Amino acid sequence: DQQVKQNSPSLSVQEGRISILNCDYTNSMFDYFLWYKKYPAEGPTFLISISSIKDKNEDGRFTVFLNKSAKHLSLHIVPSQPGDSAVYFCAASDFKTSGTYKYIFGTGTRLKVLA
Amino acid sequence: KAGVTQTPRYLIKTRGQQVTLSCSPISGHRSVSWYQQTPGQGLQFLFEYFSETQRNKGNFPGRFSGRQFSNSRSEMNVSTLELGDSALYLCASSQGQGSYNEQFFGPGTRLTVL
């Protein structure tokens, strides 16, 4: 049972335009969400996070939006740059209810930013 | 501050053998989690250790085990290797207590089972 889903395995965007990566989850107890970026032969790098008490968090070119009623979050990258080309994973945890730090990851979306 | 380190980076084993992977967390981090990454499956949670105790375990067979030492370093062991165990094994560390924690990943160990 995939509790965190990234339904688009890949996405291509022109440099300078907006990239929107989507993530859906099924567990309503999830209260903390993160996005990671992964380059080949490297471990994932933390990008941005959001707790369930917020609906938006912004950090430079990266903004994460959370829609709790739809159990959906998205990562916006504006403007997209060729160096953003990587695999992006969303992850979720139910820290407040479980008290633990088990993270459930999606299967990833490969973003390609075209110069 | 040094990041998460994992050794070895690459490993080739044959079916039936066992393997031990090592992870050194970021200094001051007490939680270490292990993940298996295979194509199309994303990162599958294996287990999490905090203060030498396993706090969480994913849905993997008993051939997968781990431990954590008093200095927070962690090892993961896979016994009786199968072809399907070929994967990238990632270790992540976090402070492990308090409120929400980000996890910081190491570069991974690429295990190939022949």
Image: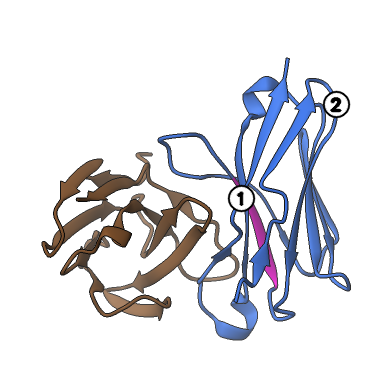
Callout 1–callout 2 Cβ contact below 8 Å: no
Residue placed under numbered mark 2 in the picture: A17
Residue B9 sits in which quadrant? top left
The chain under label 2 reads: A
* Circle number at residue A108: 1
Vertical comparison of A103 with A111: above or below = below
Specify few, some or many for label 1: CA neighbours under 10 Å numbering under 14, 14-19, or 20 or more: many
Which residue in the rendered view is the most extreme toward the bottom?
Answer: A97
Q: Colour of chain A?
A: blue
Chain depicted in brown: B
A72 sits left or right of B106 in the view: right
A47 sits left or right of A28 in the view: left
Is disc 2 placed on a helix, strand or loop?
loop
The span picked out in magenta is: A31-36
Q: Nearer the viewer, residue B15 or B65?
A: B15
Residue at horizontal 53 percent and vertical 54 percent from the top: B40
Judge depth for marks 1 and 2 and give the one in front. Answer: 1
Residue at horizontal 19 percent and vertical 45 percent from the top: B11
Question: Residue A34, percent across and down?
Answer: 64, 56
Residue at horizontal 35 percent and vertical 39 percent from the top: B2
Q: Nearer the viewer, residue B57 or B23?
A: B57
Residue type marked 1:
Gly
Say which quadrant the N terminus of chain B sits in: top left
Residue at horizontal 27 percent and vertical 62 percent from the top: B72
Evaluate whether label 1 is on the same chain as label 2: yes
The reply to whether residue B1 is visible in this rendering is: yes
